[in-house]
Image (cartoon, rainbow, N blue to C red):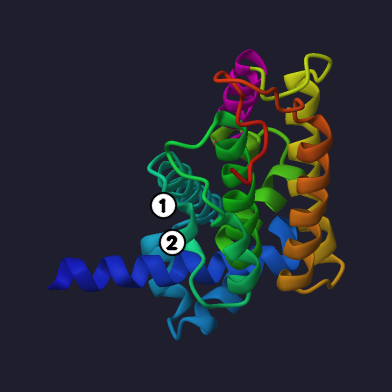
Amino acid sequence: MVQERAERTRRAMVHAAAEEIDRSGYHGASLARISRSVGMSMGALTFHFPTKDRLVEAVQALSLSMVGEAVAAVEAGEAGEAGEAGEAGEAGDAVAGGDSVQAPSLGRARALILAISRLLAREPVVRAAVRLGWERPAQEDWTASWLPRVRELLVQAHADGDLRQEADPETVTALAAGLVQGLHCRMCAGAGAHDALGQLTSILDVILDSLSAPCRGGQDTPRCSHDN
């Protein structure tokens, strides 16, 4: 019981730190504000996290865990289930369009990009990790936890003939990364999560539709659209 209570306290502190970093950045984040937001004394905070850097490490570790769970859900064909009600809920439903573990690689790449975007929109922990990456370049780029899988799926889609031959998977991967980073920038500028996610989804679909190989007739017709 004591251990569970301590873990809940630590988790509350990490979430409070993430919200503070999301708002104010690493250098602007105040340990005093973090402790007040969870109703703890500064001594209690520093008991669990002696330094700001230790708290930052916990935020980044939780972000990695969240992203890993989102990637695993897409791989298991559960992307649509992650769009629960909330600020980004309605836009999150865009992921559920028949993209499943049986879907072609291009559809799964789309589902993964949208799942990560939805997570970024709704989770201060993930946004804090992104901001930390900007402000502390020595930190590992947060895209390293999901973008390589997008690249693998796009390479497979290209090999399967679902992407046009002239479409370079590396370039499409870079476009995907730019879209997701752009979502964060729009939200930092005050855009609402629902509107920002809706625009990202529309742009992503325009890109994928334009890069999908035209369907061929016959038995070996590729599933060249994520809508299949």
Q: Is residue 162 above or below residue 25?
A: above
Residues in magenta, as a range: 146-160
At x 83%, y 71%, the residue is 191
Do residues under tags 2 and 1 come within 8 Å of each other at their CB atoms? yes
- Residue annotated with mark 1: 78
> CA–CA distance between discs 2 and 1?
5 Å
181 or 104, nearer to the observer: 104
Please identify the residue farthest to the left as the structure is shown: 1
Q: Which mark is residue 167?
A: none
Q: Quadrant of the N terminus?
A: bottom left
Q: Is residue 158 magenta?
A: yes
- Residue annotated with mark 2: 81
Quarter assignment of residue 176: top right
Q: Position of residue 89 (x, y in %)?
A: 58, 72
Left/right of residue 214 with respect to residue 93 in the rendered view: right
At x 56%, y 54%, the residue is 97
